[in-house]
Image (cartoon, grey):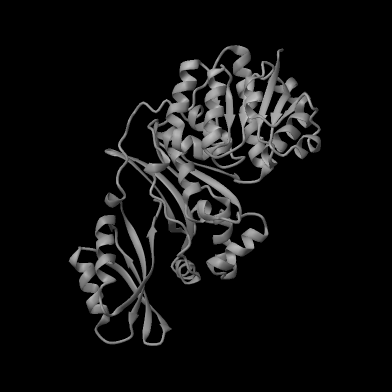
Amino acid sequence: MKTIGVGILGLGTVGGGVIDIINRHKDKMRDHAGVDLVVTRAADLNTERFAQLGLTSQQATTDAFDVVNDPSVDIVVELIGGIGIARELVHAAIAAGKPVITANKALLASHGAELFEAADAKGVDLRFEASVGGGIPVLEPLTHSLTGNEILSVLGIVNGTTNYMLSRMTEAGLSFDEALVEAQDLGYAEADPSADVDGLDAAAKIAILASLAFNSRVTLADVPAEGIRKLAPTDIEYAREIGYAVKLLAIARKHAHGIDVRVHPTMIPADHQLASVDGVYNAVYLTGDFVGDLMFFGEGAGAGAAASAVVGDLVEAARALQSGNKVIGCTCTDNLPILPLDVLETRYYVRLLLADKAGVIEQVGKVFARYNVSLQSLKQRGCAQKGMAEFIFVTHKTIEADMQSVLADIINLDVVGEVASMLRVEDLD
């Protein structure tokens, strides 16, 4: 059994967790998986981390390229994050013939194609289980266990911050701002929460999932993303009244003419398994033509969960290195087109503030009719402010482009004070 030298770039909470797992379970991994992992070099700009993690001066460096170029390092673990220097380091490691483990979803969603091509040309592994869903093992099944299936759809609650916030908005009636402050106080949300609350983190993750599920390249730029900033307790309360829950859902579906991929707040049936995923937990719900429906559930964030996924990749990369085998992530050879959001067909929930006077509904109804958008239900929820009433419209299935035309025309009516919110309704049947 060859000892495999591991080089770690970035010693934050995840990097520290990787070292802790290797130290704690070294014997188990050697006995059960047949690999002997040793951290030979590690890099971080915070020199205090070296002593905190028990690293010697020979193991520690502030220059990440020292780790990549060290001959004692067989596998490189990139945990720096971001796209700039991380991209250079991953390319350098691949060029040196070293397998790479990364948790960097932004890097893969933006530059995955070039990295996979480089890894394939060099004959080394590029593994990334921790980039989606934290500790949930979903990428490995997609590339191995489920290859006998045609994957038809992937639905995910893949951002723990927004899922926690929506859970609190549902349970306690908190506003968006109140839920955000609470999430920040608990360490679930960053000081700048934009990537989470604007749906960009989830968009990067569904790009990776869709690429693997459909063997076709999907990048972050391909994914229309809407966040939860505009959601109000009223929307969540009404959804609950009619048997729905509101989740920030990442959606990827394979159609005859291409891939439908998107991220947005979504009303889903309250009795669906995804509706019960609360707090910082994540879930990915897959449908295959033979296996049917599967759901992967677990902690989507946190040092322990992410470190667990990284070490899982490390073990597999080490085994492949010893046996001479390799697994290259997404071959993405099908080149399926990405369908524009405009052609989406679904139901819609719209909350409007309208002048509280006779004839208003008739005027608004004519705009819906102009674009052949059929209404399933209409409900007045009382007076929102002096002279204005709040109305909830729910449509039958219609085309996104037509719904957007309705909203563009409605806002110009004198009787309309505000288009307060619009949510897509997925029945998931």
For residue 96, side relative to residue 352 (left or right): right
Q: Is residue 125 visible?
A: no
Splitting the image into 4 quarters, where does residue 297 fall? top right
6 up-or-down from 187: above or below: above
Estimate the x, y position of residue 354 in percent, counting from the top left. 33, 79
Residue 109 falls left or right of residue 322:
left
> Can you say whether 146 is above or below 244 in the image?
above
Residue 15 on image: x %, y %: 68, 36
**What residue do we see at 45% from left, 65% from top?**
230
In the image: residue 61, left or right of residue 154: right
Vertical relation: 2 (above or below) 342: above
Split into 4 quadrants, where in the image is the N terminus?
top right
- x, y (%) of residue 178? 59, 68
Q: Nearer the viewer, residue 45 or 176?
A: 45
Residue 35 lies, with reference to residue 304, above or below; the image says above
| Image point (20%, 63%), residue name | 371
Q: Say whether residue 296 is visible.
A: yes
As drawn, the residue found furthest toward the left would be: 370
- Report whether 84 appears left or right of 251: right
Report how many numbered discs are placed on residues in the image: 0
Q: Position of residue 283 (x, y in %)?
A: 54, 46
Looking at the image, which residue is at 26% across and 81% down? 360
